[in-house]
Amino acid sequence: MSSISEKSKLPSKFLSWLIVVSMILLILSSLSLHQFSNNCDNSFIARSVFNFILVNNSSIYLKSNGKGDQIKNHLILSEMPKKEDTCIHKVGFQFSGHMENMDEMGQHHGAACDQSRALLRVYMYDLPSEFHFGLLGWEGSANQMWPSVSISNRFPPYPGGLNLQHSTEYWLTLDLLASNTANVVRPCSAIRVQNSSEADVIFVPFFSSLSYNRHSKLQGHEKVSANRMLQDKLVQFLEGQDEWKQLGGRDHLIVAHHPNSMLFARNKLGSAMFVLSDFGRYSRKIANLEKDVIAPYKHMVRTIPIANSPSFSERPMLMYFRGAIYRKDGGAIRQVLYYLLKDEKDVHFAFGSVQANGIKQAGKGMASSKFCLNIAGDTPSSNRLFDAIASHCVPVIISDEIELPFEDVLDYSEFCVFVHSSDAVKKGYLLNLLRGIEQENWTKMWERLKKISRHFEYQYPSQPGDAVDMIWQTVSRKKSATQLSVHRKNRYRRSQSS
C-alpha cells in the first residue's frame, strides 16, 4: 500500500511544480510587455504598433491630423514625438529580428550596415583622383584609389572660405566611403555596393564645384582651363560606360552645387539626376524638380546651440541683411530694399563680405535679430538662408523663383516668412508685415527653427537626419519617379524587339 501511495503523490507534485513555473513565466511575460509598452501605452499592445508600418524596407509613420478620421503619411525623418521614438523603432525592428545593437534611429553601432535595409544601394565609379581628392592635393599610394576615412583627420580637408558653401560633393563622397568602413558609425540610408547591377543609383564622384572654384581660370599658356578639360574627360568616360548606356544616364547622380559648375558638360549629361543649389542657371530641359535634388548650402556662420539661442526679447534688431547690395538679374531688388530700409533704427541693412571678419560679424548680427532677409541675388538662392537657420533667426524669403531643400517633407511656412518681390518693394510693406508679427507667433517659428536646423548640418561622420542623410533620403524618393519613367518607356520595347 505504501508503494502505491508514493506513486500517487508523484503526479500531484509534478502538477504543483508545473503551476509554479507557469506563474513565474506569466509574471515575467507581463513585466516584459509592460516595459515594451512603456511611454507608448499602458495596454499590452503598444499604440505605436499602429503608428509604425514597414513598407518595402522603408519606415512610414502614420500620424493623426487631429480630426480623428484621417491619417497623414510621413516618411520617418525626425518629425515624430520624441517620447514615442524609441518605442516605435523597437517595434519596427523587432519584426525583422534586428533588435540588438540599435540606436533610437534604428542604426547599428559598431557594425556594418545591412545592405538589405538601406534605402539606397549606391555604386560609385572609381574615377582617378584628379576628379575628386586629387583636387585637394591628395596623392594615394601605388594601388590606393581612395583616402582612408576611418580616422577624421587622415583625409584631406575641404578648403575654407566661400568654397565651403558648395562642398556637398565632398560630404556625400566621404559618406559613401564610410559606408564600407567598419569602425565609422553613420546612418544606413545609403550604402556603397561593389557591383553596379546591385545598385539603385550610380554616383559620379566629381568635385565639380571645387573644380570650378579652383581651376576655371586659364593658367599660364593654357588655351583650355583645367576645369573644362576635366568636364570633357568626364563626359567621354561616362558615355563609354555600359552603366550609362543601359538607361541613358537616368540612374546616375551628379553633384553640381555651384551654379557655374558643370557648365560645359551639363547639356550632354542632362539625363542624369543632378544635386543642385537651385535651377537659376539651368534650362528646364536639363534640370527640374521632377528628377533633380535641391541640396542646402553649407552655412558659414557657427551654429547656435539650442540651449543658448537668444529669445524674442534678447534680439533687439528687427531685421538683418549683410551682403552684396548691387546685383544683376533678379538681385536688383536688393538695392531697392536698401534705400527703403537703410535709415530704420532697428534694421541692419549693409554691404558685407567674407573679408575683414565678415562671417563672424554676420553671425553676431543674425543672432541679435528677429528676422533675417534672404533676397534673390544673381541666382534665386544663397547661403544666407542657411546662415539664418543656423542662427535661429526667422528667415524672410524674398525670391520668387527659389527652390528649397527637402520641401516635400519640410513645411517652410512653419519657420519662414515668404514675401513676393512685388510686395516687398512697396514702401512700408515689409516693415509693417514684420512688426505686425506678435511675439507668440515669432516664438513658434523660432522653436520650429531649433528643431529642424540639424537637417541642414554637413558633418563627418554623418548623423541621422543631417544634411547628408536628408539628401540620400531625397534621392531615394526621386528614384521612384525615375523608375516610373523608365518602366513607362519600356511598355512596348520588349514586345517589339521579340
Image: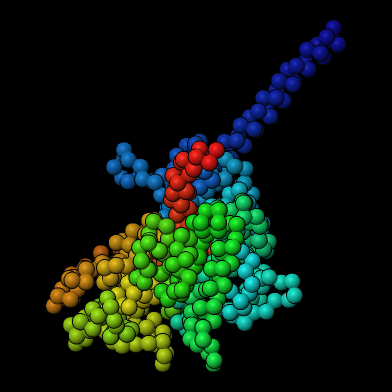
Q: Residue 489: give x, y in percent of width and height.
A: 45, 46
Q: Residue 354: give x, y in percent of width and height.
A: 41, 87
User: What residue do we see at 82% from left, 14% from top?
Assistant: 6
Q: Residue 389: give x, y in percent of width and height.
A: 38, 71
Q: Find the residue positioned furthest to the top.
A: 1
Depth check: give the residue in front, 339 or 211: 211
User: What residue do we see at 51% from left, 56% from top?
Assistant: 248
The figure's colour scheme reads: rainbow
Residue 452 in sight in this render: no
Which of the 4 image quarters holds residue 419? bottom left
User: What residue do we see at 71% from left, 72% from top?
Assistant: 144
Q: Find the residue positioned furthest to the front.
A: 497
Depth check: give the residue in front, 410 or 120: 120
Which of the 4 image quarters holds residue 32? top right
Quadrant into which the C terminus falls: top right
Q: Say above or below: 392 vs 480.
A: below
Image label count: 0
Q: Find the residue positioned furthest to the left.
A: 427
Residue 63 in sight in this render: yes
Which of the 4 image quarters holds residue 385? bottom left
Q: Residue 334: give x, y in percent of width and height.
A: 25, 80
User: What residue do we see at 55% from left, 76% from top?
Assistant: 230
Depth check: give the residue in front, 108 or 469: 469
Quadrant into which the N terminus falls: top right
Q: Say above or below: 248 vs 159.
A: above
